[in-house]
Amino acid sequence: MINLSTASYFERSTQQLGSLREQANKLQDQISTGDRLTRSSDDPVAAARLRILDRRERLAAVDQRNSDAALSDLKLADTALSTMVNIITRAKELALSAANEAQGPEQRALLSAELDTLRESLLSVANSRNASGHALFGGQTGGAAYTLSGTTITYAGTAATGAIDIGEGQQVTPSFTGPEVLNFDQGGTTTDLFALLGNLSAALQDPAVDSVAVAQASLDGLDSSFDKVTTAQTITGARMGWIDMMDTRRQAVGDQVTQEKSDIGSVDPATAMVHLQETLTVLEASQASFVKLSGLSLFNLIR
C-alpha cells in the first residue's frame, strides 16, 4: 500500500512539474514572438478567426496593388490628355489664322508645317504606354494604339478598355480608347482629330482648295474635339478620386483587422512577464519541495 502511494506521489509530482515547465516555456515563447497562440490547438476558435483575418489582409493587398496600378495609369492618361488639350488649343489658333483670307502662300505653308508637327505630336501622345508597356489609349491591345501608313493614321486598338477590380466589388477603368477621346461628330459624320489636322494641312498646301473655308469648317471640329478631351479629363479626375476614397476605406478596414488580430492573437508582454515570474516561482518551490520529500525514508521518519 505504501509503495503504491509513493509511486502515485512521484507520478503526480512529475506531472505537476512537467506542466509547470510547459507553461513556463509557452509563456517564454509568447514573450519572444508576441503571439498568444503558439499552435491552433491553444484556441481553435481564435485560430480560425485569425486565418479569416489573414485571408482578408492578403485580398486587401491584391486590391491595393490593383488600385496602385490603376491610379498610375490614370495619372499618365491625365498628363497625356493635358498635352492633347494644348495641341488642340494651338491647332485652333492656327485654324483661326488660316481662316484669314489675307494669308499668303508662304504663311499658309508655315501654318501647314506646324499643323503637321502637331499631328505628329498627337500621334506620339496617343501611342503613350503605361508602366507595364501597354498602349495607354489602345484598349486591351498589345501593340500600338495607332498606326501610320503613309499619311493615314488608323486606330489599331480594341473597342474597350478592361476594368480593374479595386475591392468590395468595385471596378475602375484606368484609361480610354483612342476613339473615346479623339473621335467626334462633324456635320453628322464621325471623324477624328488626326483626319481634321491632316485635311486642314493639305488644304493649306493646295492652291486649288478653298483653304479659308476648310479652316473655318475645322473650327467647329476643334471645338468638339476640345470638349471630348476635357470631358475625358473630368472623368479621369473622378476616377482618381474614387480610387483615393476606396484606398481610404481599405486603410480603415485594414486598421480594424490589425486591431482585431492583435486583440485575438497578440500577448501583452507585461502581463505575460508577470505570469512567467509567478510560474517560475511556483516551479522552483515545487522542485525544492519534491527534492526534500523524495529524500525522506522510513528510517528517517522512525528516527
Image: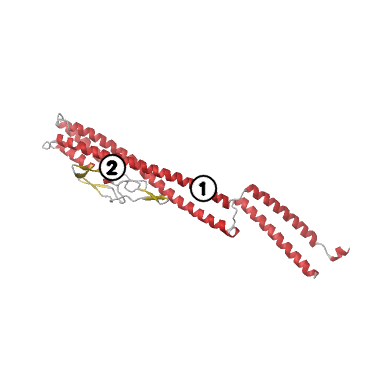
Amino acid type, residue under disc 1 in the picture: Gln
Relative image position of residue 43 (x, y in whole percent): 59, 58
Other-residue count near label 1 (Cα within 10 Å), few / some / many at <14 / 14–19 / ≥20: few
- Look at mark 1 in the image and give the residue it sits on: 256
Q: Nearer the viewer, residue 128 or 247?
A: 247
The answer to whether residue 209 is left or right of residue 84 is: left
Q: CA distance from mark 1 to mark 2?
A: 46 Å
Quadrant hosting residue 91: top left
Task: Please state the total of marks drawn on the protein image.
Answer: 2
Which of the image's four quarters has the C terminus? bottom right
Q: Give the quadrant of residue 206.
A: top left
Residue occupying image coordinates x 62% and y 52%? 30
Q: Residue furthest top?
A: 102
Residue 250 visible in the current orientation: yes
Which residue type does callout 2 highlight?
Answer: Ser
The residue identified by callout 2 is: 124
Work out which quarter of the rendered image holds the N terminus and state it. bottom right
Q: Secondary structure at mark 2?
A: helix
Q: How are the residues colored? A: secondary structure
Task: Give percent across and percent down for residue 128.
Answer: 31, 44
- Within 10 angstroms of label 2, few (less than 14), some, or many (20 or more) residues? few
